[in-house]
């Protein structure tokens, strides 16, 4: 058999193309040379035949020839890569195959096939080798025809279900994998058949027959197969199981969603519900979040796990979520008590602080709680629940509650990976729950402080109709440094006060409380507005100096330095109104006809910073006028704002007059954003006038004989008002106050009676000295008058006016019969 004939046999056997053959004897000497070998290595046959194979190879491969000859004898051939040396010395890499070539006369030679690698991707594979590769590959491989029916598949594809390869033949994708979206997969195949474009890395999620309860993910790649003329004959595709990678991505995505969704607010119930919402349906079909009662109150729970006992553990439902709405009988609503019976898994979980998982629940086991809204504890079979995890909610070594995860029968059971994911999720959320608990505690304490500093409700009086609105910039704590107050004064008058302390939050609120207390104390001295602010200014400056505070700072006792205050006194008898301001905007006045004006009020310096003395403004208000006292925050629109622009906005808002309570809220809503830049306080007072029948006044000469006339005049007035029961006390008060005025003062004396919520008796004289309450000895002949007045009346006092002083006393009308 000639070399070319032997080559023809080898070509058919190995299914190679464009290979250069040559023959070797058993010792590795060239005995046959072909034209293909000459084209590859450039040796003529005369120079090649008789050479040793080692002479045709590079030095490194020449040393391997004895070993290759031995391997050929032992294995019957060899396949691999060699570096050959051309006749001109150039090296060329070749793929080599050596096979035994039996001759007809019984001799033996070796056929060696050489293929240059420069223009080839690698080995030329025989069909046998290719079939071995496809059949033994760990990747699922299949071929479908142009009708998308299986014509071939390898053994690895069987791991995804659908039976052995022979059973698939002639079937469509939907026939072998009904749990997956066959329409989407076949759409990819048709696209490849129509366009010839390969689809690589197509991800598909579904349920394969081999794992019907488990969601699996696969990566598919599709390539069109063509005949020699380029016509499509089918689609070749591969399948790789990437379920674990898919589940890892899902776990990371779930934790990312938890980080974004949980803890967006500091409300405990909202945080618990956010935790439940994140877990369904990604991890479970039904979850519950139950917290200790003490946690929901913001209290500090006992450290460590809950104490074990035989009594049920009571928690309160803080959140739940179900993928379906058919668990009504098992659902305990948010806010209701959940009691886990002793010895149940949730009870043990709370007692030990360790998680618990059950892959398969006993279907006849009943719910672990002591009761349900329906009174019937359903079995897990009735609820269609088959797998459960309970994870304690723990933060900083303290158990706050428990979260329970359930899966229904259409999903696979929880495994260890699911439990680790649940523990990671709950651990992250537990920090948010504990932060919300701590915030609840701190906010409750702050609100108690705020309620103790601001008036619970404004006092009842007949001088003004009043409404107030307060909106802090610190929306978390609800605390701020702005404040307002209404203080009843003598003679049916009232003081209206609005102020602001620099800063926000609890420090500013505490400073505001100190300042408000000081104002109320000074108001009791019956001083004019400018004198009240002067004393307040001295008090703030002294306190700040003692603390070493800087102007406008917020810290300890010096926090009031740089504060603003507006103090207004209104008299309903004559409509007189006096006011003074310390670093604070002047009030607006809405007149009875609806027009708006701003009081031309001299501006004094902020409290404690020093400067010119405070000045008061006097005006008379018609009945039905509305005073609008406000802080800077009502006009502010940011760090910088124009007073004129702010006043114009306030003017437009005030022109829409209405019932005072809603009027006040509408003004704030119109001018203040939902999240104000600064604290806002607005106090609105609609003025009233006492009727002429409620006030009686008489001028008296400075003559002791007039005292009896004054008593009789007062008694007649009381009879006119129907207050005869107060005649005796009133006669005594009038007698004492008029007598003191005649004895110690000069000028005209005026007696005035006011009937409001109390009966007020006032005596005006020109004296400048205030009377003092004395405690006379038993041997003293006088000095008991004011002592009797103080004992028989509700309160009494002195206030100074430009004409002199007024001594007044009040008797309550609340206990008198109507």
Image: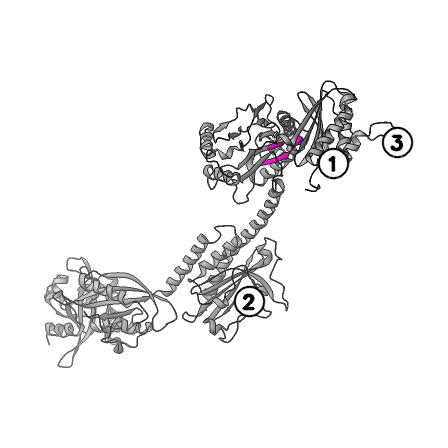
In the rendered structure, find residue 778 and report the number of the disc placed on it. Answer: 3
User: What residue is pinned by disc 1?
Assistant: 726
Q: Which residues are magenta?
A: 484-496
Predominant SS along the magenta part = strand
Q: Secondary structure at mark 3?
A: loop
Label 2 with label 1: CB-CB less than 8 Å: no
Under circle 2, the secondary element is helix
Structural distance between the alpha carbons of marks 3 and 1: 28 Å
On the question of residue 276 being in view, the answer is yes
The image shows residue 505 at horizontal and vertical percentages of 56, 40
Residue 676 can be seen in this image:
no
Q: Is residue 90 magenta?
A: no
Query: Disc 2 and disc 3: Cα gap in Å?
Result: 80 Å
Residue 129 is left or right of residue 421, and the answer is left
Crowd class of label 1 (few under 14; some 14 to 19; many from 20; radius 10 Å): some
Residue 468 point in image, percent of width and height: 55, 38
Observer-nearest of 697 and 289: 697
The residue where tag 2 is placed is 346
Among numbered discs 2 and 1, the one appearing first in the sequence = 2
Q: CA distance from mark 2 to mark 1?
A: 72 Å
Q: Nearer the viewer, residue 158 or 347?
A: 347
Residue 488 belongs to magenta span? yes
Q: Which mark is residue 154?
A: none
């Amino acid at each position: 058999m000639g070399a070319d004939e032997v080559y023809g046999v080898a070509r058919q056997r190995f299914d190679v193309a464009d290979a250069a053959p040559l023959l070797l004897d058993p010792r590795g000497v060239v005995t046959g040379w072909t034209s293909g070998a000459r084209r590859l290595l450039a040796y003529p046959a005369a120079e090649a035949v008789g050479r040793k194979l080692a002479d045709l190879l590079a030095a490194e491969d020449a040393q391997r020839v004895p070993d290759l000859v031995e391997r050929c004898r032992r294995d019957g051939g060899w396949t691999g890569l060699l570096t050959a040396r051309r006749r001109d010395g150039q090296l060329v890499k070749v793929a080599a195959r050596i096979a035994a070539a039996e001759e007809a006369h019984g001799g033996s030679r070796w056929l060696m096939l050489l293929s240059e690698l420069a223009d080839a991707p690698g080995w030329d594979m025989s069909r046998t080798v290719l079939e071995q590769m496809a059949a033994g590959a760990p990747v699922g491989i299949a071929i479908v025809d142009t009708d998308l029916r299986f014509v071939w598949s390898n053994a690895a594809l069987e791991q995804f279900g659908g039976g052995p390869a022979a059973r698939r033949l002639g079937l469509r994708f939907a026939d072998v994998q009904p749990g997956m979206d066959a329409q989407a997969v076949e759409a990819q195949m048709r696209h490849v058949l129509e366009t010839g474009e390969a689809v690589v890395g197509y991800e598909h999620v579904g349920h394969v027959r081999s794992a019907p309860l488990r969601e699996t993910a696969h990566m598919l790649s599709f390539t069109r197969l063509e005949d020699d003329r380029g016509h499509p004959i089918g689609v070749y595709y591969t399948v790789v199981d990437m379920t674990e990678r898919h589940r890892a991505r899902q776990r990371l995505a779930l934790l990312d969603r938890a980080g974004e969704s949980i803890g967006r607010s500091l409300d405990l119930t909202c945080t618990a519900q956010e935790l439940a919402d994140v877990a369904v349906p990604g991890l479970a079909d039904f979850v519950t979040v139950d917290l200790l009662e003490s946690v929901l109150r913001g209290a500090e729970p006992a450290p460590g796990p809950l104490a074990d006992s035989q009594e049920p553990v009571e928690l309160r439902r803080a959140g739940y979520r179900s993928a379906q709405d058919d668990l009504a009988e098992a659902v305990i609503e948010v806010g209701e008590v959940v009691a886990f019976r002793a010895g149940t898994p949730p009870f043990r979980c709370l007692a030990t602080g360790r998680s618990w998982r059950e892959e398969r629940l006993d279907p006849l086991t009943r719910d672990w709680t002591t009761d349900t809204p329906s009174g019937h504890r359903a079995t897990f079979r009735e609820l269609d629940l088959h797998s459960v995890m309970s994870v304690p909610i723990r933060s900083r070594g303290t158990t706050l509650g428990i979260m329970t995860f359930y899966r229904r029968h259409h999903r696979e059971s929880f495994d260890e990976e699911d439990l680790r994911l649940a523990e990671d999720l709950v651990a992250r959320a537990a920090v948010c729950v504990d932060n919300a608990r701590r915030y609840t505690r701190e906010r409750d304490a702050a609100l108690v402080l705020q309620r103790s500093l601001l008036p619970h409700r404004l006092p009842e009086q007949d001088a003004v109709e009043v409404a107030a609105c307060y909106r802090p910039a610190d929306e978390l704590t609800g605390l701020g440094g702005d404040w307002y107050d209404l203080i009843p004064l003598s003679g049916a008058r009232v003081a209206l006060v609005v102020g602001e302390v620099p800063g926000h939050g609890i420090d500013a609120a505490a400073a505001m409380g100190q300042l408000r207390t000081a104002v109320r104390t000074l108001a009791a001295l019956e001083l004019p507005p400018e004198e009240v602010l002067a004393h307040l200014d001295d008090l703030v400056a002294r306190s700040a100096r003692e603390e070493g505070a800087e102007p406008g700072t917020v810290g300890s006792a010096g926090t009031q330095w740089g504060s603003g205050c507006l103090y207004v006194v209104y008299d309903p008898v004559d409509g007189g109104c006096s006011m003074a301001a310390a670093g604070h905007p002047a009030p607006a006045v809405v007149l009875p006809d609806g027009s708006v004006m701003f009081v031309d009020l001299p501006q004094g310096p902020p409290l404690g910073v020093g400067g010119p003395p405070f000045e008061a403004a006097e005006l008379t208000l018609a009945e039905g006028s509305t005073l609008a006292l406000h802080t800077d925050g009502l006009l502010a629109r940011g760090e910088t704002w124009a007073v004129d622009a702010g006043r114009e906005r306030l003017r437009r808002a005030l022109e829409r007059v209405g019932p005072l309570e809603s009027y006040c809220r509408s003004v704030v809503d119109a001018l203040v954003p939902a999240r104000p830049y600064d604290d806002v306080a607005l106090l609105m007072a609609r003025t009233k006038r006492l009727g002429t029948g409620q006030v009686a006044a008489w001028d008296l000469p400075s003559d002791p004989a007039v005292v009896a006339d004054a008593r009789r005049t007062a008694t007649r007035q009381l009879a006119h008002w129907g207050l005869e029961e107060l005649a005796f006390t009133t006669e005594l008060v009038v007698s004492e106050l008029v007598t003191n005025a005649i004895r110690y003062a000069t000028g005209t004396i005026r007696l005035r009676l006011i009937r409001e919520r109390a009966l007020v008796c006032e005596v005006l004289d020109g004296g400048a000295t205030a009377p003092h309450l004395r405690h006379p000895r038993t041997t003293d002949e006088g000095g008991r008058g004011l002592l009797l007045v103080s004992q028989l009346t509700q309160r009494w006092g002195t206030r100074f006016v430009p004409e002199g002083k007024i001594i007044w006393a009040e008797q309550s009308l609340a206990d008198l019969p109507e």
